[in-house]
Each structure stands twice: as structure tokens, then as C-alpha cells.
Image (spheres, grey):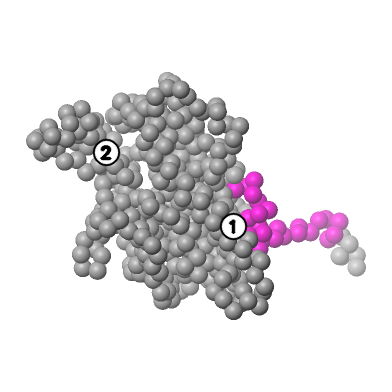
């Protein structure tokens, strides 16, 4: 009987953050499942024994980990969820809820902090993500993780969050075998049972969703999106023992230079443009820098003689990155009208407009567009981008497409 854990170097999957943009990751997973079947590996073990995620990527990562013994069907379930998404599954989007949350933010902006304090207006966030609690209960059955770890379908699951209380970046992990927690400057790891509260904390986009309280060794700390202050996104996968890491981003790693001038403007930026720029800095920039760092370290390690390399803890990391080939804010601009009316009105006051199809303004909307029209487009893009790297994916996993026997070959064999 085959071991549930694949042989060879441990492989990790890293899913980054990005709100609704995380639909792209599911399209990539669909393509990987397709290539896996094509190469005759559909009945094989879970291809990702180590899974790590941040923000919305933490939710996708955990959902996949919870079905590590049924990779194909788990990917199908995730795809069905994202393909039929509506914003109301993630946050309250009716007019009354907007009055209780988003409108209070506008009160702070228009009346000033002093008046707001006098009126005891203390909103926790722009949006109320209470519906997401219920979605996690059905999509992410975390109670299965201990069983999957014991049976060898999974080596480790890790999610990251940022502490508003201490400023530290924390990686929470649950592993099959004991792994020593690591400590670095402003970031550290904590072993323990991962819960839905950890996922809500990791995906709490700053200002947009409320911070989550988590117990930290007997005291409470409040956490927000794990992409904040995340200086080394790939690090958790490596600390958990991965020698090969597949990274799926939620935004373009680099903007082509010939496109930059097409999106420039001499007009003063709207609040939406500034907010979108800030979120892009949080969700995208650290990953691009870390990918460059890992590749540079790999190059340096290659210069070390093999005998000295074996005597140290240095090891190269086989890194495969799949990221959008198109600007996701441009995709979002085509779907702004799909947002719930109350949310569209709120964002319209910040400079998001479907009439202008302002790509810079639509960057903010792209993180909140949990609507099927947008998520389906992103899944299709993720699928096509992954299929465009078909050969690289096969090399990464060591998969080979079976050679089908032709009729002529069959006749020759029978004649012999």
C-alpha cells in the first residue's frame, strides 16, 4: 500500500492574500488537478503535504488541507464555492448594515474625531464579516486536521496573522511531527491547534474587516490581516521542512515597463486609488521581494562546494511561482456593477466608478468583489495561467504524461 505522503523532497503550497482576488488561486488548483489526472496521478497521495496561507489564501489553504485525503473532490468543492460566490457570504451588504458600519466611517471623516467621540461612534471596521463565520463552518472542517496529520495525508498547515497588540507577525502552525518554533526579527511561530478564529484574524483586511482576539499564552491579543508586515512570506513553508515550494500569488509580480505609462494620470488620486495602492503594498510587494531573495540565495548556494554544503544547514529551494498574467484591478473594473448596491454606493463616495472604469480606483473594489462574475473570471485566468506553465508544473512534481499505446503499436505487439 502506498504511503499517503509522496516520496521525494517535501513539497509545500503557499497561497498569499488578496480578498476576493484569492479566486485566482482556485483556478490554479483546478489546473493542477487536471494536469495531475492527465499524468495518471489522480489516485496518488496529496501533492502538497505542507500547506501555508495568508489572509484569504489562509482560508483556501485550510480548506485544501481539510481535504488532503481527497484532493480532487476538495478542489471541486472549493471551485464550486468560488464560482457561485456572493458578497453576502462574506460580509453584510444590505443598506441597514452599511448604516451601522460604513456610514459610521463616513461620519468620522465628515464630522471629525472630536464630534465622533462625543457621539460615542466607535466603529470597528468598514464592513461586518459575520457571514464569513458561517461559511468557514461548512467550507473548512478544521476538526479533520488532527486525523489527516496522524494518517500521513498532511505534514503541516500554517496560517499567518499580524498582532495589532504587539506589532509582531505570527505564524500559527499545526504539524504531524514536533517542529521547533522559529523566532526572527518582528516575526515568530506558534505551534497549536488552528481554529476558525485564526482564519478570521489572518483574513481581516485592515480597516475593512474587524480585528480578531486570540489567546496568546493566557492573555488576549488582537490580530489583523497576515499580509501586514509580512517580510518573508515563503519562510513558514521552508521552516516546516519544504524543499520545493509552489507559490500562487494574487496579483502581478511585476508590471511591464511599457504598460506603466498607460495607467499614469496627472489628476489628484482619489481615496479609492490611495487605498488600493496601500492594499497592493500590503498584499503584493513583500512576495515579489521574497521570491527575488530566495532565488538570489539559491544562486549563492550553488557557488558553495557540495561537500561544504552538505556539512551545513544550507539547502536550495526549488521555487515555482504562478501569478496573474493580467492586471486584476482591470478585471475588477469590468465587474464593479456586480457589487451589492449599498457597497457600490459606499465605494462610489471614495472614487470607485464603473462609468469611468478607473483601473486605479477599481483596485480597492477588487479585494471586495466576492461576486461570481468576478471570481469566475479570475478562476479562468488562474486556470489558463497554470496551463501555460504545464511543463514547468510537471517538472516540479516529477510527473510524466503516460505514453498512450497506438493501434499500430498494439498490432505490432500481437504480431510479435
Q: Where does label 2 land, which residue?
A: 126
Q: Report whether residue 214 is seen.
A: yes
By secondary structure, the bulk of the magenta-drawn segment is best described as helix
**Rendered position, 359 above or below 4:** above
Task: Kindly report which numbered mark, 2 or 1, lies closer to the viewer in this rendering.
Answer: 1
Q: Residue furthest left?
A: 118
Q: Where does label 1 land, which residue?
A: 295
Is residue 181 rendered magenta in the image?
no
**Residue displayed at 34% across by 67% down:** 190
Front residue of 265 and 25: 265
Front residue of 393 and 265: 265
The quarter of the picture where the N terminus appears is bottom right
Point out residue 213 in the picture as x, y percentages from the top left corner.
Answer: 24, 56
**Residue displayed at 59% across by 44% down:** 385
Q: Residue furthest right?
A: 416
* Labelled pair 2, 1 in contact (Cβ < 8 Å): no
Identify the secondary structure beneath mark 1.
helix
**Rendered position, 87 above or below 345:** below
Point out residue 234 in the picture as x, y percentages from the top left corner.
Answer: 49, 58
Q: Report whether residue 379 is seen.
A: no
In the image, the segment drawn in magenta is 386-410
**Residue displayed at 38% across by 33% down:** 274
Amino acid at each position: 500500500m502506498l504511503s499517503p505522503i509522496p516520496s521525494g523532497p517535501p513539497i509545500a503550497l503557499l497561497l498569499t492574500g488578496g480578498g476576493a482576488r484569492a479566486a485566482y488561486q482556485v483556478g490554479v488548483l483546478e489546473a493542477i488537478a487536471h494536469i495531475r489526472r492527465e499524468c495518471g496521478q489522480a489516485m496518488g497521495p496529496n501533492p502538497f503535504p505542507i500547506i501555508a496561507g495568508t489572509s484569504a489564501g489562509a482560508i483556501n489553504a485550510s480548506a485544501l488541507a481539510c481535504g488532503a485525503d481527497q484532493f480532487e473532490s476538495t478542489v471541486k468543492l472549493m471551485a464550486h464555492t468560488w464560482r457561485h460566490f456572493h458578497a453576502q457570504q462574506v460580509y453584510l451588504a444590505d443598506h441597514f448594515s452599511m448604516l451601522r458600519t460604513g456610514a459610521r466611517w463616513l461620519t468620522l471623516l465628515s464630522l471629525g474625531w472630536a464630534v465622533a467621540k462625543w457621539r460615542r461612534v466607535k466603529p470597528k471596521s468598514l464592513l461586518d464579516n459575520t457571514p464569513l463565520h458561517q461559511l468557514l463552518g461548512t467550507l473548512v472542517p478544521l476538526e479533520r486536521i488532527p486525523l489527516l496529520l496522524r494518517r500521513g495525508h498532511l505534514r503541516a498547515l500554517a496560517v499567518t496573522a499580524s498582532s495589532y497588540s504587539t506589532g509582531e507577525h505570527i505564524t500559527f502552525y499545526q504539524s504531524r511531527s514536533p517542529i521547533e518554533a522559529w523566532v526572527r526579527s518582528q516575526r515568530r511561530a506558534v505551534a497549536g491547534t488552528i481554529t476558525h478564529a485564526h482564519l478570521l484574524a489572518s483574513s481581516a483586511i485592515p480597516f475593512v474587516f474587524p480585528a480578531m482576539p486570540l489567546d496568546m499564552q493566557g492573555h488576549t491579543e488582537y490580530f489583523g490581516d497576515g499580509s501586514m508586515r509580512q517580510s518573508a512570506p515563503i519562510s513558514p513553508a521552508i521552516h516546516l521542512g519544504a524543499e520545493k515550494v509552489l507559490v500562487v500569488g494574487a496579483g502581478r509580480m511585476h508590471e511591464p515597463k511599457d504598460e506603466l505609462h498607460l495607467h499614469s494620470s496627472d489628476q489628484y488620486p482619489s481615496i479609492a486609488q490611495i487605498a488600493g495602492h496601500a492594499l497592493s503594498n500590503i498584499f503584493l510587494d513583500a512576495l515579489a521581494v521574497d521570491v527575488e531573495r530566495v532565488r538570489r540565495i539559491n544562486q549563492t548556494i550553488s557557488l558553495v562546494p557540495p561537500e561544504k554544503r552538505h556539512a551545513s544547514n544550507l539547502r536550495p529551494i526549488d521555487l515555482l511561482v504562478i501569478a496573474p498574467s493580467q492586471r486584476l484591478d482591470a478585471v475588477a473594473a469590468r465587474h464593479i456593477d456586480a457589487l451589492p448596491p449599498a457597497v457600490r454606493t459606499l465605494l462610489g463616495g471614495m472614487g470607485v466608478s464603473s462609468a469611468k472604469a478607473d483601473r486605479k480606483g477599481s483596485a480597492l473594489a477588487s479585494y471586495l468583489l466576492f461576486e461570481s462574475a468576478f471570481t469566475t473570471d479570475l478562476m479562468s485566468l488562474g486556470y489558463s495561467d497554470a496551463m501555460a506553465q504545464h511543463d514547468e508544473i510537471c517538472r516540479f512534481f516529477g510527473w510524466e504524461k503516460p505514453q498512450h499505446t497506438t493501434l499500430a503499436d498494439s498490432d505490432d505487439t500481437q504480431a510479435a
